[in-house]
Amino acid sequence: MKLIVGLGNPGKKYLLTPHNIGWIVLDALACHWDLKWRAKTKLQSQVTSVEQKNILLVKPLTYMNLSGSAIKNIIHYYKINLDDVLVIHDDTDLPFLSLRFHKNRGPAGHNGLKSINKELGSQDYARMRVGMGHNTIPFDKQQKEQESAVKKSANKKKSGWLPSLPAIKIAGVSFPINPIAGQRLVLKPFTKEEQKQLPNFLSKSIEAIEYFL
């Protein structure tokens, strides 16, 4: 079984914040595949699956800094190998909405990844880093560079276990903006201009996941 984990925090106030980009990507993917999330209380997660492709999508409900506990439970319950795990998370060291794939890499200060590595006793799993650094270049001008970088960092062919994915359409889906003064960058909601870039980014990110895996 293939496991795709999106890191984030539960609660409406975190709904559209950079720290929740892992959840945002998985929500878009689940919506596109017409999948329904279900709570697994004992596993501390929301899960959904593509049974015919043996794919499991997971959103830990433990809050970011305790993500490792939920992921450990999921991996043990479903008997998943670390080689079949992909974790999607925010990264403030990368340009806004840029993508990079890595495996067996340190957490670089990310508390969610620190928790995962501690609970699993390993960092030997794949990660998709989503840039949440300062947005200096419009997303549409970054696309060619990002696509090239994804192919280089993936450095392998598609395995074919993900369905074909056309562009995602999320027009009409509204995300409330509730600025939270005094919080860190990753916990502040996206600006209106940043939100406008999300639909195109979500389409490209899922294409990147398909290519990488």
Image (spheres, rainbow, N blue to C red):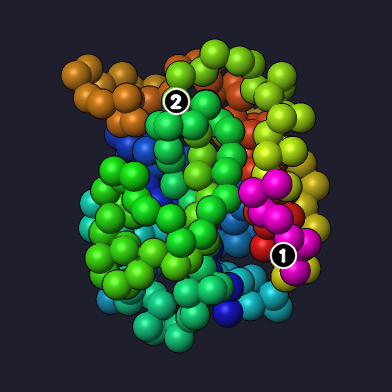
Q: Is residue 18 above or below residue 208?
A: above
Q: Amino acid at mark 1?
A: Leu
Res 176 → quadrant? top left
Q: Is residue 129 above or below residue 175?
A: below
Per the image, label 1 sits on a secondary structure element best described as loop
| Secondary structure character of the magenta stretch overall | loop
The C terminus - image quarter: bottom right
Q: Which residues are magenta?
A: 152-159
Q: Which residue is mark 2?
A: 133
Question: x%, y% of residue 56?
Answer: 54, 70
**At 34% from the left edge and 44% from the top edge, which residue is drawn?**
108
Pick whichever, 180 or 176, lies toward us.
180
**At 59% from the left edge and 40% from the top edge, which residue is drawn?**
99
Q: Is residue 87 above or below residue 145?
A: below
The N terminus - image quarter: bottom right
**At 63% from the left edge and 39% from the top edge, which residue is drawn?**
202
Question: x%, y% of residue 37?
Answer: 49, 62
Pick whichever, 2 or 93, lies toward us.
93
Tell me if residue 46 can be seen.
no
Whether residue 153 is in magenta: the answer is yes
Q: In this rendering, would 155 be left or right of 166? A: left
Question: x%, y% of residue 100?
Answer: 57, 43
Whether residue 198 is in magenta: the answer is no
Q: Which residue is mark 1?
A: 162
